[in-house]
Image (tube, grey):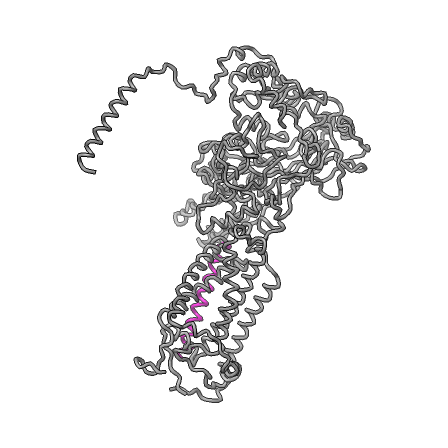
Amino acid sequence: MTLRQLLAAGMLCAAALVQTAVLAADIPSLGDKLPPHKSTADHSKFKELDKVFKTGPEVTKACLACHNDAAKQVQHTKHWTWEVIDPKTGQKLGKKNIINNFCTSTVSNEKDCMACHAGYGWEDKTFDFSKEESVDCLVCHDSTGTYRKLPGDAGHPIYVRKEFPAGSGKFVEPVDLQKVAQGVAMPTRTNCGTCHFFGAGGDGTKHGDLDSSLRNPPKFLDVHMDAKGLNFSCVNCHKTSQHQVAGSRYELAASRTGKPQPQGKVDDNPASCQSCHGDKPHKESLLHAERLNTHTDTLACQTCHIPEYSRGSVGTEKVWDWSTATKMGPDGKPVLKKDSIGRRAFDSKKGDFVWDSYLKPEYRWFNGKVAFTTRGDKIDPTKTVEINHPEGKPNEPGARIWPFKVHRGKQAYDPELKNLLVVHTAGEDHTALWHNFDWPKAITTGMETAGLPWSGKYDFVSTEMSWPIAHMVAPKGDAVPCAQCHQAEGRLAGIDGIWLPGVHKNELIDTVGWLAAALALIGTLIHGIVRLCVPCRKPRSKA
Amino acid sequence: MIDPVRPGYVYLYKRYERFWHWAQAALIIFMMITGFEIHGAYENFGFKRAVELHTLSAWTLLILWAFTIFWQFTTGEWRQYIPTFKKVGAMVHYYSIGIFTHAPHPFHKTTSSKHNPLQRLAYLALLSMVSPIIWGSGLLYLFFAYWKDFGLDKWLSLQGVALTHTAGAFMMLVFFIAHVYLTTTGHTPFAHIKTMITGWEEADEH
Amino acid sequence: MLKIITGTIVGLVLGALIALGVASQMAGSMMFQERVSPFTVEETVARIQQNILAAGNGWALFGLRYPARPVEAEGGNVLPVMLIEACSVKYSGPILKDDKVRFLSLLMPCKIAVYKKSDGKVYIGIMNAGLIGKLFGSMVGETMADVVRDQEKFLVMDPTKPAPPMVIPKVGEGGGGGAGGSAGGC
């Protein structure tokens, strides 16, 4: 470029700048600032919502006036039906049907359990699943953090000030439904966490990889949800369409393969790591990248990248032993004991508990399908009953080795009919276990409500439940170090179908090999000693 | 053949040959150390580091071999590995009896024939059996990630490849022990090693 | 002859090296001890704290530190570690009064570490105060011997007794990832 060309270019630029400045001055200034919320609608300005709401359903009706298909959509989700039909076996699953080894069963306990139902008024089997105003919009869309539903109210929010827990001397105030309705927004971690952090009745109890520490997690705890970093909300991965939330435990993508999908492209299940990262995600180190990418044919991402779950003081429940429930204190009154940092250790209503944090997962082959032992299914009480069995054989194409939290416990079963029992635990009536501490009465009501026969006998059987671990993903530098699996008695000890260098050996090759080496060593040593010690018969001739 | 520059000595191993030998020796020893650690025999570098070092040494040795093969053919030295059965019996007799009675060595090294008949057989076995076992299995092990691309996963199992590699490693270990010992069988214990370092062999006069 | 001398020297050097190696290995395990706890990290801490409070001899809890927290604050993961700090004026006083050994304040307060390892087990780490004490004269030696005797009592845990609550000192009094003194005895 010559000097003249440069000068000319410079002048052109200057002229353009002046022109831009003039144009900018011509634009009339906007009176209002950009609204702070992301939505195109400011719900606080709608007159439909500017009124006193007495109940949840009243709010829903107001929502449906504009969002006229919303309730229909919700009514097609698990969040509403609490039911999943296993496409293979036709078995009826979902919270409505299964028995777990925490609170065991929702049947006959709806008034308490439905505090986590996205609806209002599910008290018993007469609940009308088609009533649109029974859908609870607010539990997912509240942005004020003031919307609360308590056990005992069958899914309704708090309408009148009341003592909770009963007899605790603590009171909860009624929800200002108008304020909540006017402040609706896209669900945040806190919304989903309202139920999913508190599954089985307490913070961190059920999942182990989901607890209240994920409302505002630091980076070490979850690299994606890191509040000061990527700050993903649940729906960033659990992409939702027509209120259907992707990535349910009941239809888990255990082994998605292929390249990463750009956001927005239709994916059958975007809630897997591979959806964004692909199945060959390791790039950094030339020496290791391909070796690590090979591991993705065998291991789930979570297996290395969630070295421990419950990484915090909230912790998670490892054991729930119902067999000690109804045991009273020396004074004949119910007892409540806590562990060293205030988590439940014993409750006369519920039995013994064991809690811990920073837990190493247990590993199993898993193809995404889970076989359930549910109501009425025959069990073998001589063995630990697997309430849910992660399916998948070693090296089956869709299966990977996954990390699990295994929750162990003892719970009531019928020793004659050999099935798990539905127990009526919650409620104020005289048959509720937590009210009257009488097992036979509680079982009678529970089984009658479930419409199942009971022999009249009960005992306790050891059960376990496996929960796939997929949250609390550590930063990449904190992935499980190689040697923790590639060593004898390492993390994957006992897993079939894999060849682990550093662990697996062939006894014959090793024995023969070391023997040959030892013989070579001994042979040469003897040869050498003899050479040195045998007296010379012939003097060495040397030049 | 007595070297005219240095009477009484034969210049047996050229500079590249010596460099190759010692570099290869160091790499093989190092790969045995790291390899048996990967195998789980003991802990020193830690599994991950051992794998890294083992892999790096493998690549280094491959490069060294590329140069060496080129060198063997351009210099014609490859002929040193052509087996011969002449005097094999005499060699066996020497190592099992003669050596103890200080009988003269039945073989005299010359620049055109540096290895005794037993050596030739041993090196040939190493080259034609142990090396292919180790390299074949080792490279397959290293490129496990690409088996699917070539359909190899239908024919091979990681276990088979790993075990072959281990078996090869044990063969190499036995060779190493015997080889190190046999270097001490010169007219003084360090004579052969000295030759391998300097290149000069003291000419025997019998 | 030369061979014999060379051989002897090589032998001596090798022997000395091996002895040094063994000694350095031993020294580490002699200075510090580690044992497995059957309880969770928190319960182990709580039980030790309870023992310290019941030990008499002027023992008091000095603080509870979380060395893992600064690492977590930087975005890194480490398994939980808790440092129980305990102090007794009965033992610290004489040492602090003696100019010759005042530098041993470096070892105060007494620390007991409770931590998890990647095997999933909980460990208790203690310093061998007795051995250190022996290196600094009879007064320190005797004091440390008493400390060791008490320290052993801190670690006796009866699983039939219920878990006591962990004593969490007030947050904010310490710095750098730690929480400082509660009822400091020093």
Tell me the quarter of the picture where residue A26 sits.
top left
Q: Residue at x 64, y 33 (%)?
A: A337
Q: Can you say which quadrant of the picture contains the C terminus of chain A?
A: bottom left
Tell me the quarter of the picture where residue C160 sits.
top right
- Residues A480 and A279: in front is A279
**Is any part of residue A241 visible from this angle?**
yes
Q: Position of residue C73 (x, y in %)?
A: 45, 37
Q: Position of residue A11 (x, y in %)?
A: 21, 28
Q: Is residue A506 above or below residue A204?
A: below
Q: Is residue A322 above or below residue A495?
A: above
Q: What secondary structure prevails in the magenta region?
A: helix
Judge whether residue C3 is colored magenta. yes
Q: Is residue A489 above or below residue A330?
A: below
Q: Position of residue A488 (x, y in %)?
A: 58, 54
- Residues A410 and A63: in front is A63
Q: Can you say which quadrant of the picture contains the N terminus of chain A?
A: top left
- Residues A339 and A319: in front is A319
- Residues A479 and A346: in front is A479
Left or right? Give the position of C56 relative to A97.
Answer: left
**Is any part of residue C170 visible from this angle?**
no
Q: Position of residue C28 (x, y in %)?
A: 48, 54
Q: Residue furthest bottom?
A: A538
Judge whether residue C140 is colored magenta. no
Provide the residue span drawn in magenta.
C1-30
Q: Residue furthest left?
A: A4
Q: Is residue A373 above or below residue A432?
A: below
